[in-house]
Image (spheres, rainbow, N blue to C red):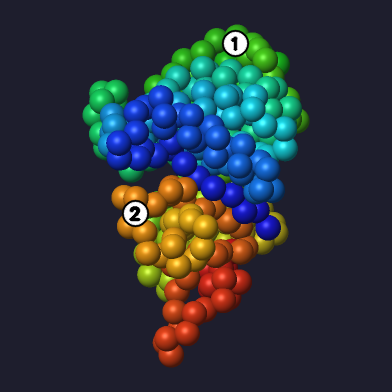
Amino acid sequence: MDFGIFTMFSTREGSTQQQIFQEWFNLAQVAEDAGLDTLWLGESHFRPQRAVLASPLVGASAVAARTKRIRVGLAVQVLPLANPLRVAEEAAIVDHISEGRLIFGVGRSSFLESYEGYNVDYAESRALFLESLEIIQKAWLEDTFSYTGKYYDFHDVQLVPKPYQKPHPPIRVAVESRETFALAGRLGFPIFIRYQMDVPELQDLLGQYRDARLAAGFTGPNDVILQIAAYVADTVDRARARSPRRARCASGVWCRRLCIGPQTPRRSNGSNASPRSWCTRFAC
């Protein structure tokens, strides 16, 4: 089981940007001291009322330098918006700073403002993502490599440094669009999902992911991390009573195989489903 929290350094009404950074760095230390497994860092651009973490790798570097035990995950690095060689270099540096605690989460993001701000065509995002991910893996795995693709052309490049973890940090892919589940399965990567559709549909999509993995020759159970919203207070009653605007909000709780929180679904008879049975319904 992996239990952690996710944030893009969410803003709080009335706080300055300096205060927001300090609050989340303090909460990273709380997560470390509380024994959480992973702090997941997202990427947010051009939305000052939502979050301030424009670079999850820079944030991960700061968190890694402040902590000793907790894993530091990207959730996610938006690959179509950055040069893949630069991402590979910086991720390898963070892997060394953390002494092997980095988890390299990647995706395309569904926030169009980011693509518009960087003047990147969202229609090209899937192809850009796949090409970037291939380049990053080659840069990490090969001493010197060359690559010629639709978007990038590199010749005799030797990436320095190589990652601390061998062969490289674990890679995890975010899936949101329905067609991405089978694609991620064919690539064999573990995935992130958010609880944003009906359970039967999500079960079907996870089945497509499983079947695509098996057809591509990958074995073992699905490795799925689920994000659910949670509000944190001293007691359950206080957490439920607070509005999202006022609550101290971890933007999400990420968990593998065990899913808990005040939004636990109810059975048809009105009683709460147990956290473990809820997660089992998703075939995690």
For residue 134, side relative to residue 195 (left or right): right
Q: Residue at x 43, y 37 (%)?
A: 8
Tell me: residue 59, above or below residue 144.
Answer: below
Disc assigned to residue 244: 2
- How far is disc 2 from disc 1 in space, using C-alphas? 48 Å
For residue 197, side relative to residue 63 (left or right): left
Q: Residue at x 66, y 48 (%)?
A: 34
Tell me: residue 251, above or below residue 243.
Answer: above
Identify residue for label 1: 157
Q: Nearer the viewer, residue 50 or 45?
A: 50
Residue 216 location, x and y as percent? 60, 52
Q: In which quadrant will I find the N terminus?
A: bottom right
Q: Are marks 2 and 1 in contact (CB under 8 Å)?
A: no
For residue 172, side relative to residue 204 (left or right): right
Q: Nearer the viewer, residue 230 or 200?
A: 230
Indicate the amino acid at tag 2: Pro
Helix or strand or loop: what does disc 1 sit on? strand
Q: Nearer the viewer, residue 88 or 229?
A: 229
Indicate the amino acid at tag 1: Val
Tell me: residue 180, above or below residue 204.
Answer: above
Residue 27 location, x and y as percent? 55, 39
Pick whichever of labels 2 and 1 is earlier in the sequence. 1
Q: Residue at x 64, y 27 (%)?
A: 66
Q: Quadrant of residue 179?
A: bottom left
Residue 251 location, x and y as percent? 43, 47
